[in-house]
Image (spheres, grey):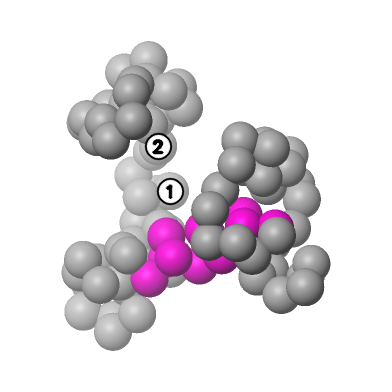
Amino acid sequence: MGPGAMMGPGMMMGGGGMMGGGMGHGMMHMMTIMMDADGDGAVSREEYQAVHARMFDAMDLDKDGKLTSEEMQEFMQGGSTTPDENQ
């Protein structure tokens, strides 16, 4: 996938996508509960973006506002999980 490309349906989950296997109904329900900050039973764009902003902050180990492949790999292998752990 080139720069600026967007991921399509199934690229992260299921159907042999990038992450493989997919998620069962129970896992999807748990993720909805975790992301649904206002408790309305749905995840708004703002709620979705807030979760991903926290993930970005946790991965950005040098706090330069950019993610390198090394930072992402460190995170995926169990590195920093809190934004201020490496400050």
Q: Dot 2 corresponds to which residue?
A: 23
Dividing the picture into quarters, in which one does residue 36 lie? bottom left
Q: Amino acid at mark 1?
A: Met
Q: Dot 1 corresponds to which residue?
A: 27
Q: Nearer the viewer, residue 17 or 30?
A: 17
Question: Label 2's element?
Answer: loop
Q: Which residue is the extreme one toward the bottom?
A: 38
Q: Which residue is the extreme one toward the front?
A: 64
Left or right, 10 with reference to 63: left
> Does residue 77 lie above or below 32 as drawn?
above
Number of numbered discs on residues: 2
Q: Residue at x 29, y 81 (%)?
A: 39
Q: Amino acid at mark 2?
A: Met
| Main secondary structure type of the part rendered in magenta | helix
Quarter containing the C terminus: bottom right
- Residue 49 among those drawn in magenta: no
Question: Label 1's element?
Answer: helix
Q: Is residue 21 visible?
A: no
Dividing the picture into quarters, in which one does residue 85 lie? bottom right
Question: At which x and y percent is residue 81?
Answer: 69, 61
Left or right, 50 with reference to 56: left
Q: Residue at x 28, y 84 (%)?
A: 38
Mark 2–mark 1 contact, CB under 8 Å? yes
Question: At which x and y percent is residue 57?
Answer: 56, 65
Question: Which span of residues is magenta-colored?
Answer: 50-61
Q: Is residue 30 visible?
A: yes
Question: At which x and y percent is residue 23?
Answer: 40, 37
Left or right, 44 with reference to 38: left
